[in-house]
Image (cartoon, helix red, strand yellow):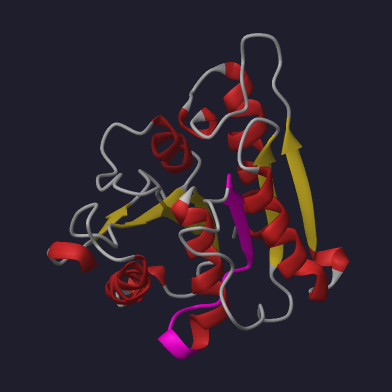
């Protein structure tokens, strides 16, 4: 839907939708094509919303936030999505943007998420947690790797300290043998990746799905 940096893809499941999963990609990953994780979510009955949020890799970090908001408003103008529970998952730069969405949802005119999954947060050199606080009641899963940027993970855990501990948890993905929990690990599709990334999201969605 739309063009340019505010474009958004809405990928419907084959049957009756049970939830909306907003998937916020990493820097420069502009197309939802060829992503098995998205196909998996659709096979389970989830509508996947994939905001582009960038024209190209040269967009400013601040511009991506405005583009994200505009793209999501395009998506949620679709009446068929109304009333469905919304869960967001973000990887890398998207792992920051999921929190920008959560903090600003009402101001942006968007549905508040039931849950947020932030996977392998980006370096705080490019931008850390947003200003403001999360709305009450959102479940948060913060996922980091033992060979990823631990300082970034720490910054988000510090930010979440003011949020009720009963509503958020931290998951550290550990390297096993040749399987390294570095920054590209969430893009893998092997059995361990499906276990540590896909399965927790499936559980979160199942908790709130219609």
Q: Is residue 111 magenta?
A: yes
Q: Is residue 177 above or below residue 36?
A: above
Residue 81 appears at what percent x and percent y? 40, 69
Which residue is at the far front? 125
Q: Quadrant of the N terminus?
A: bottom left
Which residue is at the far left? 3
The residue lying at 73 percent from left, 80 percent from top is: 136
Q: Which residues are magenta?
A: 107-120
The residue lying at 18 percent from left, 59 percent from top is: 55
Viewer-side residue, 121 vs 111: 121
Residue 201 appears at what percent x and percent y? 62, 45
Q: Quadrant of the C terminus?
A: bottom right
The residue lying at 49 percent from left, 78 percent from top is: 111
Viewer-side residue, 50 vs 26: 26
Q: Is residue 131 left or right of residue 29?
A: right
The reply to whether residue 16 is in sight is: no
Q: Is residue 187 above or below residue 164?
A: above
The quarter of the picture where residue 157 lies is bottom right
């Amino acid at each position: 839907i739309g063009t340019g940096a505010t474009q958004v893809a809405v990928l419907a499941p084959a049957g009756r939708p049970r939830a909306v999963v907003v998937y916020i990609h990493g820097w420069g990953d502009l197309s939802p094509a060829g992503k098995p994780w998205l196909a998996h979510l659709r096979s389970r009955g989830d509508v996947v919303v994939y905001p582009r949020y960038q024209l190209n890799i040269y967009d400013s970090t601040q511009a991506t936030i405005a583009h994200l908001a505009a793209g999501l408003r395009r998506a949620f103008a679709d009446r068929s999505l109304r009333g469905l529970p919304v869960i967001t998952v973000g990887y890398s730069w998207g792992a920051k943007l999921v929190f920008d969405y959560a903090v600003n949802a009402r101001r942006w005119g968007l549905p508040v998420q039931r849950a947020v999954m932030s996977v392998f947060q980006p370096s705080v050199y490019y931008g850390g947690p947003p200003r403001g606080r999360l709305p009450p009641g959102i479940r948060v899963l913060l996922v980091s790797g033992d060979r990823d940027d631990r300082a970034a993970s720490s910054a988000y855990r510090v930010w979440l300290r003011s949020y009720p501990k009963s509503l958020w948890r931290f998951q550290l993905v550990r390297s096993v043998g040749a399987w390294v929990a570095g920054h590209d690990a969430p893009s893998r599709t092997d059995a361990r990746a499906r276990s540590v990334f896909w399965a927790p999201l499936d559980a979160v969605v199942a908790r709130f799905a219609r």
